[in-house]
Each structure stands twice: as structure tokens, then as C-alpha cells.
Image (spheres, helix red, strand yellow):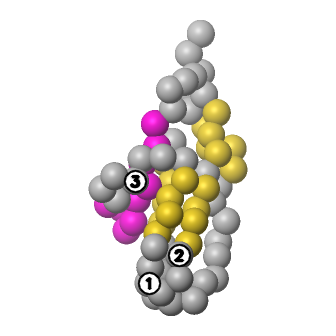
Amino acid sequence: MLVPPSITSLPLSQTNLMGSTVVFVVEATGTEPLRYQWRRNGANLAGATNATLTLPIVQVNLILAARA
């Protein structure tokens, strides 16, 4: 039986210093394999297709969305 993907834990909002590394994590359930795509301003982030997103340099007002 196929179970549709569902996000069970959204990434937490974070406050970090400019230039520092930030890590976002999303948790989801559903029939494996699950696929992930992180987005910014409605556009897919290239290569950002895991449950964890690591950004090495924080920018001002960075807003992201996760989709399972």
C-alpha cells in the first residue's frame, strides 16, 4: 500500500551570525523512497534534495521552504 508523503517535523527557525553555517532538518513519513526538494523564494535550490540542508554562509533574511 502506498502512503503519500507527509512532513511530520518542519525545520526550526534559526538566528545565526552572518557568515556562519546553518543546518535545517525536515522529517517526513510515507512510502520509501522519499524525495526532498528545498526551495527559496519559490525556486528549487539546485542539489538540495536531502532531509538536511546545510548552508555554509548565512545571508541576511534567508527564507527557505521544505517539500517532501
The span from disc 3 to disc 2 (Cα, nearest Å) is 15 Å
Mark carried by residue 59: 1
Can the viewer see residue 44?
no
- State the image quarter where residue 27 is shown: top right
Q: Which residues are magenta?
A: 35-43
Hey, what amino acid is under mark 1? Gln
**Of the image marks 3 and 2, the number of the one nearer the N terminus:** 2
Badge 1 density bin: few <14, some 14–19, many ≥20, Cα 10 Å: some
Q: Secondary structure at mark 1?
A: loop
The residue sitting at 46% across, 73% down in the picture is: 56
Q: Nearer the viewer, residue 55 or 1?
A: 55
Hey, what amino acid is under mark 2? Thr
Q: The N terminus appears in which quarter of the rendering?
A: top right
Say whether residue 56 is left or right of residue 9.
left
User: Percent position (x, y) of residue 20?
Assistant: 53, 82
User: Percent position (x, y) of residue 8?
Assistant: 69, 44
